[in-house]
Each structure stands twice: as C-alpha cells, then as structure tokens.
Amino acid sequence: MPKTVVPEEKRRRRRPTRGGTVLSERLIVEAALRLLREHGSAGLTARRLGLALDCDPSTLYRYFRGMDEIILAIGDALIGQALHGWVPGGEWRADLRALGLRIHAAYIAHPQAAVLTTSRVTGRANELAADEVVLGVLHSAGLPAAETVRVYHAFIDQTLAFAALDAASLALPNAALRAEEVVWRSTYARLPASSHPHIAGIAPLLAAEMVTSAYPAALDLLLNGIAALRGRG
Amino acid sequence: MPKTVVPEEKRRRRRPTRGGTVLSERLIVEAALRLLREHGSAGLTARRLGLALDCDPSTLYRYFRGMDEIILAIGDALIGQALHGWVPGGEWRADLRALGLRIHAAYIAHPQAAVLTTSRVTGRANELAADEVVLGVLHSAGLPAAETVRVYHAFIDQTLAFAALDAASLALPNAALRAEEVVWRSTYARLPASSHPHIAGIAPLLAAEMVTSAYPAALDLLLNGIAALRGRG
DNA sequence: GCGCTAAGGTCAACGGCGTTGGCATAAGGA
DNA sequence: TCCTTATGCCAACGCCGTTGACCTTAGCGC
C-alpha cells in the first residue's frame, strides 16, 4: 500500500471515485467532522468515512497514512477555524483574551472532534500559525524571552486543557450522558448528610454549576497573573 | 449473560478460574493498570485482561457491565490513591494546594490510565470522598455557598484538565511520542524567521519548556484568586 | 452429610474495526 | 497516441467488545 502518501499540493491525477466525486484532504476532513457530530467521538471509522464519501475505505490511505493522521488533520482544521478572520487589536490583554476564547469556542463547537485532538501536537500549518500569533502578542506585551515561554505554555495548555475537559462532557454519547445525569441527580443529590455533609448541603447548586464551563474565569485569573509579571519586571 | 452484575460486597460463591486464582474487582483493576502501563492507553482490551488474569474475557462481565465500567473503576482507584493517608492541616490554602498536587500527581503516576478516566464522572466511593474533602476545605475558608460552588468547580476542573493534558503527552505510544519529538526538533526548530519570526527566535526555549507541566503555576494563580475573593467578602 | 439452586466459570460465534497486498484503470506528460 | 503510474477498488487478515448457551461447583437449608 502507499508507503508514501502524495502531499496534497502535488496531486495531479484526480480520478473520481465510483460515486463520481473527486476526493481531497478537505473533503475527507469535512466528512469526518460530519460523522463525528452525528455518531459521537467513537463514530469516526474508516468504513463509515468510506460510506459517507462513497469510496472504498482503503482509498483513504492514498491521502493519509492512517486514521491517526486524519485525526491530526481534523485538529488542525479546528485551529484554523479559530483563527479565521482574526486580527490583533494591539492591546495584549484584550488580544490574548480573545484568542483564548476563540480557540476554546472552536473546539467546543465540535466537541466530538475536540475530544480526539486537543492533546495532540500536529506541526501542521494552522497550529504553527496560531503559535506564532500568540507569541507575537506576548512579545508585544514586552515580556522577557524566558517568561514569554513560560506564559505561552501556561496560556496554551490551560486553553487546550479546558477545551478538552469541556468538550469531553459535551461529547459523551447519549447513553453515557444520561448515566452521568443520573449520577448527579441520584447519587449526589441523595447522599446522607451524616456521611457527606458538605455535598448534601449544596447538591442542587452543584448540579447547576457543573454544567457550565469554568474556562472564562480561569482565563481572567491567568491574565491577571501576566499583568502582575509585567508590573514587576 | 449477566444482565445484573453481583455487587462486590454481596459476592458469596467465589469460584476459582481455570488458572486457580479467585477474581475480585480489585484484582481486575490492578491487572488493568498493569496492562495500561505496559501496552499504552489503547492496550487495555478484554482479551488481554483475560490473558493477564488467566480467565476467559467473558468472565469479566460477571464483575463489570463492560469495558467502560472497568475504566470508571480504574479512575476511582486513582482518586483513592490520591487521597490515601491525607489529613487536612487546617489552613485552607495549604490544604487546597496539597490536594490539587496530590490528585494531579496520582493521575500523572498512571498516565495511560489517566487519559481514559480524567474526564469521567463515576459517582463511586472515592470520587465522592474527594469531593467531600474539597468542599470541606472551602467551607473552612469561610466562602459563601454560591462562591464555594464556583470555586470548587474551577479548582477541580483545572486539576483534572491539566492532569488529562499532561497525562496525554506522557501516555503517547512510543511511535507517536517520537513523532512529536520530531515535530518539535525538525518542524519548529527549523522554521524560517521570515514566515514565523517569533517561533524561530525562541525555538530552543520552547522545546525545553514544553516538556514540563504548567499545573503548579496555574494552581497558584487560582489560589491567589480565591484569596482575593475572601479579602473582598 | 445431602441435594438443589444458581453464581460464576468457559466456549464459540457475531459483527465491526484498521490496515494491507494485489489488481484494474484511466489521467496526463511525452 | 502511447506509456507510466497515480489512484481507485476488492478481498482478506487479525484484532476488538460483547453475547447466549452451556457446564460445574460453592454454599445454603435441612
């Protein structure tokens, strides 16, 4: 089989599948996103992808080395969507805040895909572009190089980490989702105050709070921390 | 098949497997943790578990409803390890810090298992105990109920989110790990300054920074934020 | 001690998965 | 127009989780 996948920009012979469509990386990634949304994060399979694109599953190996590489491409597409149309405003704090929220939002918009991709380093074009943008903003904030890297790390990891966690609960298949709901309503809400006094005291508040994202609050704390660094330096 | 799994504490008939060992939830979870460490986070399969325990894979269904329930049990065991032997010191900030670091460390100690479990709500005994402990500490800090819930949410999500992210890179199978290394060394380190000036300027610093965890720094920021809330309230 | 019941073990099979080697065909440069 | 070879398709391999039927024996009531 194709030991060497022909890179997208070098493709010349564009032969249609039995369904008549001409494939491309873009088309495959888009179909994968559709499948993920419809069938959940475990619903992306080579066979289903073939079915959706009306081609043989093995054809996908002409475009990607395997399912894993398709997943990386999906991740890069999400980052691309996050950055699409963004222009820096020039004020580091507002810019960083917007970037964080945009990246988080882009992942949350495709939770099933986010689950598969948030913790992968792809080295693909959009990921590199995003890193470059964030480092540029930090540079404009006037941080010394050593602190720039530390802050960059904290910022990007916190954003991805919350995106992953928030996506995970949004992406649970319906059965598991309902199971978790049941856990919250039955187990937590009915714990006897004798053994678990603190949970019992605020179980309803908990159930309401835990369905929202803690990311915006955490982001603002981080930005405060960066501001403090600048003041000191 | 067993529509109803007999709960562990109700087990009476303890029949040995063909290998002569008598099974239990504990034994199964321990074997699973061993498999995960040896074969990576995708290496936990019912067949392998059967091989490791010298029993038929279908026997596992007498103890758990399926692989997913085994994964939840593994997660609960990790939380149990994190809390094991911990006693509150009475000072809320030190207590919260210790709790966060212990939970993070317990997951990081089993990265392949952490990848599978960090974002799951189990409702099992150890998880409930941990929640109770954290809420107890926040209560002792004197926060009003509404803020207790918000802070609890931010604290626990941040801890789990970073644990998941940090575990994910530690848990990558060797092949993928080497691939990411290559990305850092080749792609990032050799980007031309013309297209990616900021990355090119600090690539060596980045490569060194990105292999550590940003959690301790993020945790301290959060604790600062809580302290500020108390001062205000 | 003895029998009965059913818990808990085993076995074989199902459908689905990612991936691969071999083959057919048609695109596009010469 | 011909030839090469990129790119599509097919069939098959060895995994996977899960299930239903079967069998064995532990442990209870007497």
Image (tube, coloured by chain):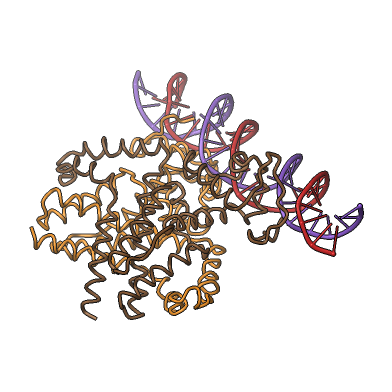
Chain colours: A brown, B orange, C red, D purple
Viewer-nearest residue: B6 or A127: A127
Q: State the image coordinates of residue A127 (x, y, percent, origin top left).
A: 47, 63
Query: Where in the figure is residue A167, as x and y percent of width and height?
Result: 38, 49
The structure residue drawn at horizontal position 46% and vertical position 66%, both measured from the top left corner, is A129
Number of marks present in the image shown: 0
Above or below: residue A64 compared with residue C30 = above
User: Which of these two is toward me, B79 or B42?
Assistant: B42
Residue drawn at x 21%, y 61% as measured from the top left: B96
**In which quarter of the view is residue A11 placed?**
bottom right
Q: Nearer the viewer, residue B187 or A202?
A: B187
The N terminus of chain A sits in image quarter: bottom right
Residue D13 position, x and y percent, is 71, 46
Q: Is residue B101 above or below residue A112?
A: below
Quarter of the image containing the C terminus of chain A?
bottom left
User: Looking at the picture, how far across and down is residue A156, in whole percent?
Assistant: 37, 64
- Relative placement, left or right, of B49 versus A156 is right
Residue at screen point 48% across, 67% down: A128
Image quarter of residue A73: bottom right
**Placement of A75 over or under A206, stated as above or below:** below
Whether residue A97 sits left or right of residue A1 in the image: it is left
Residue nearest the viewer, comparing B90 with B11: B90
